[in-house]
Image: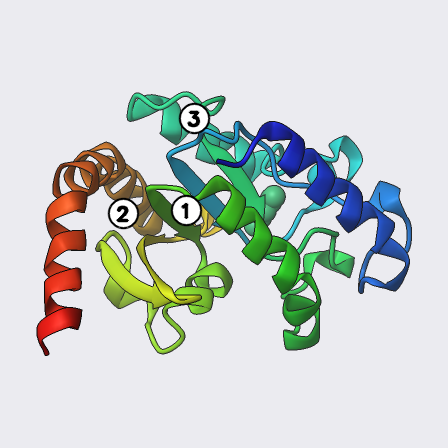
Amino acid sequence: MSTQDDLKALNKKLQAASARLPLAGTPAAIVPGEGPITAEIMFIGEAPGYHESVQRRPFVGRSGMFFRETLRQVGISDETVYISNIIKARPPDNRDPVPAEISAYKPYLDEEINLIDPVLIVTLGRFSMAKFLPDARISQVHGRLHKVGWNGRKRFVLPMYHPAAGLRSTQVKNAFIKDFEKIPKAVAWIKDHHLDLQLEEEVRDALF
Ligand code: URA
């Protein structure tokens, strides 16, 4: 079982690597993930914006407030979930991350996922969705629970629109809120079915 100290050690490692990480340069530029090691739900966004880089916390700007408020509306406290990003330092002018940047931060995000070992991963926006569902289109798959093979094991992933897109379009905002309402149900369903699904896989692997 991982502990909160394992997360602290990972963040220390990330800060120690900041000089050679793109967009960072110094430990102060790093915006680590936040939340309890016991979190059942892990949210993965894109990259910190201005407010995140000043406060050194993920999702604390305008879109972050919308995200956290929507969580509250569906009965989930933001203190019980883990919130992170694909990229841990702010891209200039909030531009999209490039593949080399995504690769540079990948080992840290992968380790975060392994340490948290969440019941459900919710991706926010197309960059984090592409980590698990590289060929999917967000307009077609948002709000649908996916079971994916990732790093040698199965993970449940619920892709969602990015909250910033929800702030730009009423239609996306409504879809974003509706999709969030599915999160508690998805977690309950996975927990109810987990052992059955695991057994089914073991039998399938053994027999076929
Ligand atoms: N957008 C993101 O993707 N992540 C943040 O932390 C803030 C805004």
Please say if 16 is above or below 23: above
Tag shown at residue 2: none
**Which is more toward the observer, 199 or 83?**
199
Circle 1 crowding by C-alpha within 10 Å: few under 14, some 14–19, many from 20: some
Residues under numbered marks 1 and 3 in contact, where contact means CB atoms less than 8 Å apart: no
**Residue at the disc numbered 2:** 175
**Residue at the disc numbered 1:** 166
Residue 159 vs residue 104: left or right?
left
Q: Is residue 167 in view?
A: no
Q: How many marks?
A: 3
**Could you tell me which residue is drawn at 76 percent across and 50 percent down?**
14
What is the x, y in percent for residue 20? 87, 64
**Could you tell me which residue is drawn at 81 percent across and 62 percent down?**
21
**Could you tell me which residue is drawn at 25 percent across and 51 percent down?**
143
**Amino acid type, residue under disc 1 in the picture:** Gly
What is the x, y in percent for residue 105? 67, 61
**Could you tell which of marks 1 and 3 lies nearer the N-terminus?**
3
**Could you tell which of marks 2 and 3 lies nearer the N-terminus?**
3
**Residue at the disc numbered 3:** 69
In which quadrant of the rendered image does the C terminus lie? bottom left
Secondary structure, mark 3, is helix
